[in-house]
Amino acid sequence: MDKKIKIVGIAGSLRKEAYSKAVLNAAKELTPEGTEFEICGIEEIPPFNQDNENNLPISVKEIKAKLMAADAIVIVTPEYNFSFPGVLKNAIDALSRNEEGRPANPFDSKPIAIMSNSPYMLGGSRAYYQLRQVFVYLNANVLNRPEVIIPFVKDKLDKNGRLSDEETRGHIKKQLEALLQAAMKKSA
Ligand SMILES: Cc1cc2nc3c(=O)[nH]c(=O)nc-3n(C[C@H](O)[C@H](O)[C@H](O)COP(=O)(O)O)c2cc1C
């Protein structure tokens, strides 16, 4: 492979010890060789106000530039009230808006892998499908399969908070391989 594929990863939780961050770290570890994986935090993104969309804060501009330059995106979301967290929606809303003279939407046609997780048995799938729906409007290329929806996530971490469950790591790896294929196809 001549050109290194660049992936940007975002966790949809601000919590310091978030399970979603542990899953994202595992994705970074499992990224196939020859691929760059950069994690971008959304902690600094302020509440989006459309009055200011032509003067986006630096935190938004920086992440947006990284997303524009990325070949693919990974988003790991928890489930809040049968959906994905408002902070993640706020980040996507802010990142998807135009700035004068700049391309508007860093998600447009971009391969995206969604992973969701929950400490509970049935959590994660509702967040997964609602997030997928948002990316329909943004014309992203969200992978249909394999899906990664991780129940009982807290039982899959070791004592250092690392996602160590081998079966789950295997699912993540397969999804990343599919993402890489989609990214290479797009950039060919
Ligand atoms: C406001 C709120 C709503 C929640 N709703 C759900 C839910 O609908 N389904 C679920 O499985 N867990 C739900 N939970 C529990 C979260 O899965 C749990 O707090 C998890 O640790 C959050 O993800 P994180 O560790 O990545 O921050 C909710 C938690 C909060 C704070």
Image (cartoon, helix red, strand yellow):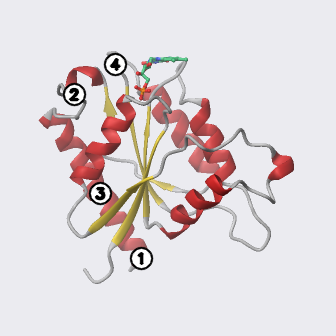
Quarter-of-image position of residue 91: top right
Quick check: 185 left or right of 61?
left
Which numbered disc, 4 or 2, marks the residue that appears first in the sequence?
A: 4
Which numbered disc, 1 or 2, marks the residue that appears first in the sequence?
A: 2
Quarter-of-image position of residue 1: bottom left
Please report the residue visible at 77 percent of the width from the left and 74 percent of the height from the top: 101
Distance from Cα at disc 4 to Cα at disc 2: 11 Å
Do the CB atoms of the residues marked 1 and 2 lie less than 8 Å apart? Answer: no
Distance from Cα at disc 4 to Cα at disc 3: 26 Å
Which numbered disc, 3 or 2, marks the residue that appears first in the sequence?
A: 2
Name the residue furthest left: 166
Look at label 4 and name its amino acid: Pro
Q: Which mark is residue 119?
A: 4
The secondary element bearing badge 3 is classed as: helix
The secondary element bearing badge 1 is classed as: helix
Q: How many numbered marks appear?
A: 4
